[in-house]
Structures are given as C-alpha cells and as structure tokens.
Amino acid sequence: MVEKRLGVAIAGPDAGTILARIDKAESLGVSAVWLTTGGAGLDGLTILGAAAAQTESILLGTSIIPTYPRHPVAVAQQVQVIAQLAPGRFRLGVGPSHRPTIDGMFGMDFGAPLTNLREYLQVIKPLLQDGSVEFEGQQYRARAALTSPVDVPVMASALRSASFELCGAEADGAISWVCPPQYLRDVALPAIAAGAKRAGRPAPPLVAHVPVCVHEDPDEVREAVRAQAAMYPRLRLYQRMFAAAGYPEALDGAWSDAMIEGVVASGDESSVGGRVRGLFEMGATEVLASLILAGPDQEASLDRALRLLGKVRPEE
C-alpha cells in the first residue's frame, strides 16, 4: 500500500530564506517539501541540491520544473546530484507550464503540450530509472546513459482529464493544482485510472496540490488569495477547469468568493485539518499544501501553518 503523506510547497524571496524554511519544516515534522520553478525565478533543483546536503529525512520534490526550456537529459544531470546527496528522498515533478510563460517569456512555441509532456516522460523516466534511453519523437531526441540508475519517481502536472489520463499511463504520479475536491473525485481520479488501465499498469498516486491558509478572518483570507494567486483564473486552461468543476464565473477572470471557499483549505487548525483529511478520504495519496499567508504578520502566518502541517496525520 502506498503511504499517505502531507507535504508543503516552500517559497521565499531568496535561496537562504527557502533553505531555512525547509529546515524549519523538517524540524516541525513535515514529511515532504516541494519547490516550484517558474519564469526567471530561483531554480528549484539547485536549491534542493543544497537542501539535500543539510537535511536528514524530509522528502524533497519539484512541483514543477517546466519542460520546454530544459531538455530532459539536462534535467537528469541535475537530478543525479540530488539523488546521490539524498538517496531515496527526491521526487521529480515536471510539466509544460503555461503559454504566457513559455511563449511570452521564453519565446518558445507552446504547441502540443500533451505531446511535449508525454515525450518528456518517455525520455527522462527510462534514463533515470533504467540508466539509459534511446528515443526519437516529434519534439525530443535523446541517446544517453548514466553510470547507474537512480531511485527517483517522475511525476507530472495535470489539470484537465486528458493530462490526468496521460499521467495514469506514463507518470509515477499526477500533481494537480487548485482543483476543487469534487473535480479531483469526479474527473481526475477516473482519468488516472483509465490511463493506467489502457497502459496495463497500476494507477499511480494523485498528489492534490491545494492552497492552505490557517487564518480565521474570511475577509483577510479572500484578500490574500486574490493577491497571492491572482493569475490562475486569468489563464484559459484554469478557467475551463473551474467551469467544469461548477464555477462558470471563473470565465470572468477573477476569484469569486465561492471559488475561494471551494478550493482553499482555510480557517483555524481544526477546520484546515479537516479539509486536508477530506482530500485523503476522497482518494488523494498525498496532499501538497501551498501556503497562503494572511494577516499583518506573514511570518507568523507561515509559522502557524507549518506547525499545523507537521501535526496533521492522514489517518486521523
């Protein structure tokens, strides 16, 4: 049986702050930390290389590394370092990201993102896990070998049914983001199962990546969500996901109060703990919490959330 786990996405203004927060999460009993690499921001794999050398037991992961700007063989070079410094503790999460980033920032064609993700997985998984790859597809070519394989699960981001089905067929796990629980239950999990069945393999786990805000004032929670996660209802793919989940107002390009209530696990410790455990009961194998910091003292908000996430147990 796959172990159920609660992890947290760590962010910060600089590498030193992020590393200190990873240390704090480990000391508070958080079982896994994840870093996101986006745009021209800090590189998650580089920071996790440093974290691997200074932590002892906490799991490390990326959610996500964008695929288009980095050839999978180049990513495998970095991953080997982390895997050697923290054996059995690293999970790689990859995904195509979004058109505004890939096209607008990098000037790269965002065409056929599912093909891109499928081929990326078909290169990097055998290279890491078997030690070699020979592949020629529509978007990638690769012929490479490692000194020895490394123990690294390769997960992928998913938002709509086709990407969840792709994860079921090709990845070691599917990582969602801001998907309401009913959407994960009714769309994501069946699609993962269908993809796995088509590929003749067991269904991989679902990592439910959700915003978490341990704060009792609902007005301040809504203000924080709209400030810290404003972009997602503006993106077409997310708008369609929200609409399919029962929130057609997402097509207006902003968070409604109902969307925030449906997506964000917020409130006091008891309320947030209950929402998190509800995701496990719904079928998630792992919950990945991205912290929404609310109130005048954001460092205190961060500390409160980390302390809670270090105590919540899926089986309670």
Image (cartoon, rainbow, N blue to C red):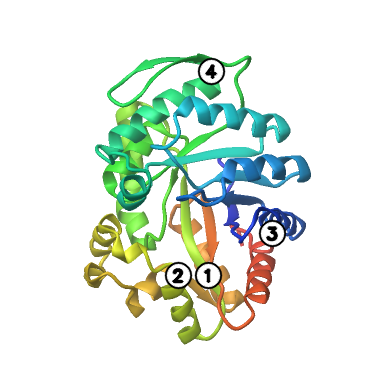
Front-most of residues 45 and 255: 45
| Distance between mark 3 and mark 2 Cα atoms | 25 Å
The reply to whether the C-beta atoms of the residues labelled 4 and 1 are less than 8 Å apart is no
Circle 3 or circle 2, nearest the eye? 3
The residue carrying mark 3 is: 17
| Label 4: few (<14), some (14–19) or many (≥20) C-alpha neighbours in 10 Å | some
Question: Circle 1 is placed at which residue position?
Answer: 292
Q: Name the side, left or right, on which 111 lies relative to 299.
A: left
Q: What residue did someone put label 2 on?
A: 264
Single out the mark in the foreground, 4 or 3: 3
For the question of whether residue 59 can be seen, the reply is yes
Q: Secondary structure at mark 4?
A: helix
Residue 175: % across, % down: 44, 47
CA–CA distance between discs 4 and 2? 39 Å
Amino acid residing under circle 1? Ile
Circles 2 and 1, Cβ within 8 Å, touching? The answer is yes
Report crowding for label 1: few under 14, some 14 to 19, many 20 or more residues within 10 A (C-alpha): many
Q: Earlier in the sequence, mark 2 or mark 1?
A: 2
Query: Marks 4 and 1, how far apart in space?
Result: 39 Å
- Percent coordinates x, y for residue 287 in the rendering: 52, 55
Quadrant position of residue 169: top left
